[in-house]
Structure formats: C-alpha cells, structure tokens
Amino acid sequence: MPGDAPLRIAFLAYRGNMRCGGQGVYLWFLARELARLGHRVDVFVGPPYPAPMPFARSVTQLPNGEFWGKWFNGEKAAFRPEGGWLRMFEPINFYELGASRLGFLPEPFAFSLRAWRALAARLRAGDRYDLIHDVQTLGWGHLGIQRFGVPMVTTIHHPLTVDRRHSFQRDETLTDAVGTMQFHPVGMQAFVARQMARVITSSEVSAREIARDFRVAPDRIRNLSNGLDTGLFHPDPSVERDPHEILCVGRAGDPTKGVDTLVDALALLPAPTHVTLVDQDHPLHRARKRAAALGCGDRLHVTGRVTDAELVRLYNRATVVAVPSNFEGFGLPAAEAMACGTPVVASTAGALPEVVEAGGGGLLVPPRDPEALAKGIRALLEQPEARQELSARSRDRVIANFSWPAIARRTEAVYHETLREHRGTANETLRDHRNTGS
C-alpha cells in the first residue's frame, strides 16, 4: 500500500527450478516483482535450484540427496550422499533415504526442517523478517518456524488431494494405489496449512478445494490468480499463422490434461486440420497410438521438449489453441495463448472458465466431450472475424489480470493485511497480560 515501509520477506520453496513445476516459476517471478516494488527478499530453496536471482538480497541453497527421484528412476548407484557415507547417518539425510526407499516423498518435510534451522541461524545472527512466504512446502518444520513469532503465509496452487485423486484414477493395481497413498503427504500439508496466517491461491476453484479438502477457513484464503510473463508471451506478427493448426500444451500421460479427448476430436475434423502437441516424445507415446488407431496419426505431431522462445513461436503460428483438460487449478496454457493473441477452445473443467472469462479470448465446451470440442474448434477455424475479435481484446485483459506486476501488487496487499492482523493480535495479547498482571 502507498506509504507503507518496504518489507523484509523470506521465501521458502522446497524446489526452485522453473522446469520442475509451477512453484519454481512462481517463486522466481514473484520474488523479482516484489524486489522491484522495493521489498527486501531472501530466498531459502531446495534443489533443483532456481536460475540466478540477482534481485534477491540472498539465495540460500538447502541441499538434499534427491533420493526419491533417484529411487523412482532406478539410480541406486547414485544414492551415496554428497560429502560421503558418514553423512547418511545425519537424522534428516537418514530419514530422506529411508522414506524414499519406502516410496514416500520426503522432500517437503525434510526441507521444512532445514529451513527452520537456516532461519534460526539468520535470526541468531541478527537478521529480522517481517513476513515468511512458503511456496507449497507445508512441512512439519514450519510449525517450528512459527515459533519465531514472524507471521507466515503459504501459496497452494491446488491441494495435493487433487493430484492424489487423479493418481488413483491411473492406478491399475492395489500396489499402485498403496504407492499413491504413500507418495502424497496430504495429512501433513493439510494440518500445516490450517496454521498459516493466510493461504494464497490462484483460482476460486482451488480456493474451494483447499477449504473442503484441507479444511482451511475460507476467510483466510485469498485468490490472487496466477502470474504470466507477458513480456515473453506476446503477439509476433513476423510468425505466419497456419490456418489449419491446432496447438495443445500438455502431457498425454496425465489424464487431467484431456489429450485423449483432443485426439478423438481430431478424428472428427477434416484434413488438413492437424494438431501440434507440446509434450515429451517417445516411441510408445499414448496420443500417437490413439491417433493411429483412429486413422488420424499423420495429423498429429508431438514436438518433444521445446525452448520458451519456440513455445511462443508455436502459440503465434497456431490458429487455435485447445485446452481440453479434465481439471485445472489455473490453466496456464490458456493464459499464455491469449497473451499471444491466439484464440482458445477450453473445457469448462476446474478454473478454466475463470481464466478464459478474465482473458476474454476463447470459447468454452464441456470436458470429456470430443464432439463438442471438435465443434468449437471448427467454429473458430471457419470464422476469421470471430478469431480476430477474440484476439483483439485478450492481450490487454491478460496483462491486467495475470501479469506478474499485477500479481505482486495483490500479494503485497495480502502481506500488509496479514501484518495488520498480526500486530492487532500481538497488541491484544499484551493487553491481556497487563490486565491479568502477568
């Protein structure tokens, strides 16, 4: 808020790289924009680590053995901890190794303990923080961090219960289902989330899921939307549109992304209409097999990994972007497409209606309905005037609703709200002590 002093903020994130999930993107851009607003930012982060953050006062890397990933990939020879085998008997390292071998995800809990230790050292050395912002870690160690007396907020893009439900849908055996139960630390995250001063999320759908599944009081949840790098994702007139190309960004192996529905819709669309799917490619790719079985395999292209610059080019080359998801806590591809001026056909699942309505650049169709999806795509392919109208209004609306400067200002307002409440509670506690003579 205008006139408020700059804040001293400590960010906590158990994974920080942009390629390892949305929390890495969120951490980097939000920290940058808050620093640009004049706040002092310190980052405590686990591997894989973020790109350089020159805008932060400090970045403290809190290493772990990354044992779960090694166990999952069968890299047993890589289990030797950095620094030698004796380090394996340090309690946190020993816990991480044992939990990973049993199929549990140890990183959030272990990181929270390391962050607790690192923050305690900073405070003993004389550092001070006005507020601590956790990025979807929610480990037991955060309960110790709260004892420092600094108000703490957390960001939850969607509760882990959503991932667990979708994992159960993929499971084929009892062993798979047991693995799903072990992997997702739902109980820990739900309990810790209820202790946070505020929970920040990115959509009304996610806010409702957090309130229902994690039992967080709705009056402590704030929906600020998600951020988008509108400098990177922008219209590029030098890229020629392909009048027959549909672009989809999503993993075919993730049932929540609805790629099967898109392939079924492609089979209903006439040639030369074709789909470009941004996904890792391999010989047994699920979408390739499905398209071949439906007789449209020659009209599906899987890109493999692409750079950010290439992704922007693909958004600008496509005539329509399809987002056929069965659930989205936000729906970043829809926002990215609209930022590039490319119309979207998205499902009405999860937060996609919120995103498409706010961006103003697309049509909505029911999820898991190939006929409806094909009809929506055909309508835009055949109506250049409608596409132009959607494109013309989406860019400015995306900037207003989803640009990182806008998200940072909303987050800043939540910080000040949290601090006012914290100071009020502290003053009330002090008055109670004085009144009772303690």
Image: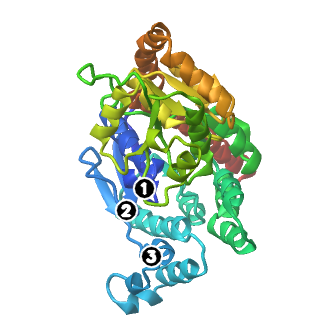
Q: Quadrant of the N terminus?
A: top left
Choose top left, top right, bottom left or bottom right for residue 368.
top right
Comparing 259 with 437, the one in front is 259
What residue lies at 56% left-to-right and 17% top-to-bottom? Answer: 379
> Quick one: SS at disc 1?
helix
Residue found farthest to the front: 295
Residue 240 x %, y %:
28, 22
Judged by depth in the image, the label closer to the viewer, 2 or 3, is 3
Between marks 1 and 2, how big is the CA–CA gap? 7 Å
| Residue of label 2 | 48
Q: Which of disc 2 and disc 1 is earlier in sequence? A: 1
Separation of residues labelled 2 and 3 (CA atoms): 13 Å
Q: Is residue 238 left or right of residue 423?
A: left
Residue density around tag 1, few if under 14, some if 14–19, many if 20 or more, within 10 Å: some
Q: Amino acid at mark 2?
A: Pro
Q: Is residue 258 left or right of residue 93?
A: right
- Element class at badge 3: helix
Please state which of residues 310 and 433 is positioned toward the viewer in this rendering: 310
Q: Is residue 382 above or below residue 102?
A: above
Give the secondary structure at mark 2.
Answer: loop
Mark earlier in primary sequence (2, 3)? 2
Which is more N-terminal, label 1 or label 3?
1
Label 3, label 1: how many angstroms apart (C-alpha)?
15 Å
Q: As shown in the figure, which amino acid type bears the numbered disc 1?
A: Cys
Contact between marks 2 and 3 (CB within 8 A): the answer is no
Q: Is residue 256 left or right of residue 314?
A: right
Q: Which residue is mark 1?
A: 20
Q: Amino acid at mark 3?
A: Lys
Q: Position of residue 24 (x, y in %)?
A: 41, 50
Q: Which residue is mark 3?
A: 70
